[in-house]
Image (spheres, rainbow, N blue to C red):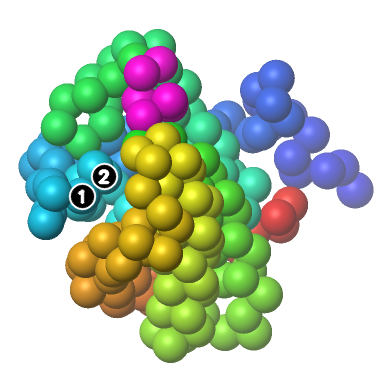
């Protein structure tokens, strides 16, 4: 019996062509979620954006490896100068500013969300919600807050307090991620079969 995947084209990263297309699609989704712009709150150096939702969805639906690759693709576009970050920003300057740690946290967060969702016996709303909160909120904050504090010169506890303004919105994004992921799992179960993650 022949291997049905033997004739499927792969990329240099070892992804099947269909997986590469999914990675590119989610990178585009993260960029599109930045179109509404960035909302600075209470003088915080880091704005509120919808892009964290795309990061959570990339991990939950694509899995750990492909979700992280989608975020890396998005960040590569930003580094190349394309205005894909919230508020139409792009370029290497974003990677040395107050948001730099959050951008790194996007990659790690997508990977953690994907890993946790993959380990669920069944894709449930509460299971995905927990994964999105841990990876898409907790991990992103853990990477972002110390870097923001270092760049702005504001002590970490004070920066963490300032960042608490993001929490209600990010929890709503986690709820949206769970609802969408469960919907995708019911409508197209094969979409969440992460054989390689």
Image location (x, y in percent) of residue 191 = 50, 59
* 20 w.r.t. 128: above or below: above
Q: Which mark is residue 44?
A: 1
Secondary structure category for the residue under label 1: loop
Q: Are the residues tagged 2 and 1 within 8 Å (C-beta)?
A: yes
Between 17 and 79, the residue placed more toward the observer is 79
Number of numbered discs overlaid on the protein picture: 2
Crowdedness of circle 1 by 10 Å Cα count: few (<14), some, many (20+)? some
Foreground of the two, 128 or 25: 128
Q: Residue at x 34, y 61 (%)?
A: 158
Please say whether residue 93 is one of the residues in the magenta stretch: yes
In the rendered image, the residue lying farthest to the right is 1
Residue corresponding to mark 2: 46
Disc marking residue 180: none
- Please state, as top left, top right, bottom left or bottom right, where the C terminus lies in the image: bottom right
Assign the magenta stretch its main secondary structure: helix
Q: Position of residue 190 (x, y in %)?
A: 54, 62
- Residue 1 in the image, given as x and y percentages of width and height: 90, 48
What secondary structure is found at the residue carrying circle 2?
Answer: loop
| Residue positioned 43% across, 26% down in the render | 95
Q: Is residue 58 at all visible to an observer of this figure?
A: no
- Is residue 176 highlighted in magenta? no
Mark 2 to mark 1 CA distance (whole Å): 5 Å
Identified at 29% across, 20% down, the residue is: 90
Label 2 Cα neighbours within 10 Å, binned few <14 / some 14-19 / many ≥20: many
| 163 relative position to 57: left or right | left
The residue positioned 44% from the left and 57% from the top of the image is: 156
Position of residue 142 relative to residue 65, above or below, is below
Q: Would you identify the image quadrant in which residue 28 lies? A: top left
Q: Which residues are magenta?
A: 92-97
- The answer to whether residue 65 is visible is yes
Residue 81 pos. (x, y %): 32, 12
């Amino acid at each position: 019996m022949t291997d049905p995947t033997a004739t499927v084209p792969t990329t240099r990263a070892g992804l099947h062509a269909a997986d590469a297309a999914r990675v590119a699609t989610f990178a585009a989704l993260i960029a599109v979620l930045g179109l509404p712009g960035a909302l600075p709150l209470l003088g915080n150096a880091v704005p509120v954006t919808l892009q964290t939702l795309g990061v959570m969805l990339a991990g939950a639906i694509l899995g750990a490896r492909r979700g992280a690759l989608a975020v890396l693709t998005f960040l590569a576009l930003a580094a190349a100068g394309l205005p894909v970050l919230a508020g139409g920003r792009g370029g290497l300057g974003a990677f040395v500013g107050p948001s730099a740690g959050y951008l790194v946290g996007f990659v790690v967060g997508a990977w953690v969300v994907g890993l946790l969702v993959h380990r669920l016996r069944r894709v449930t709303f509460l299971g995905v919600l927990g994964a999105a909160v841990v990876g898409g909120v907790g991990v992103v904050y853990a990477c972002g807050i110390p870097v923001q504090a270092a760049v702005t010169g504001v002590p970490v506890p004070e920066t963490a307090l300032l960042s608490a303004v993001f929490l209600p919105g990010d929890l709503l994004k986690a709820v949206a991620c769970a609802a969408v992921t469960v919907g995708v799992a019911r409508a197209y179960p094969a979409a969440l079969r992460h054989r390689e993650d």
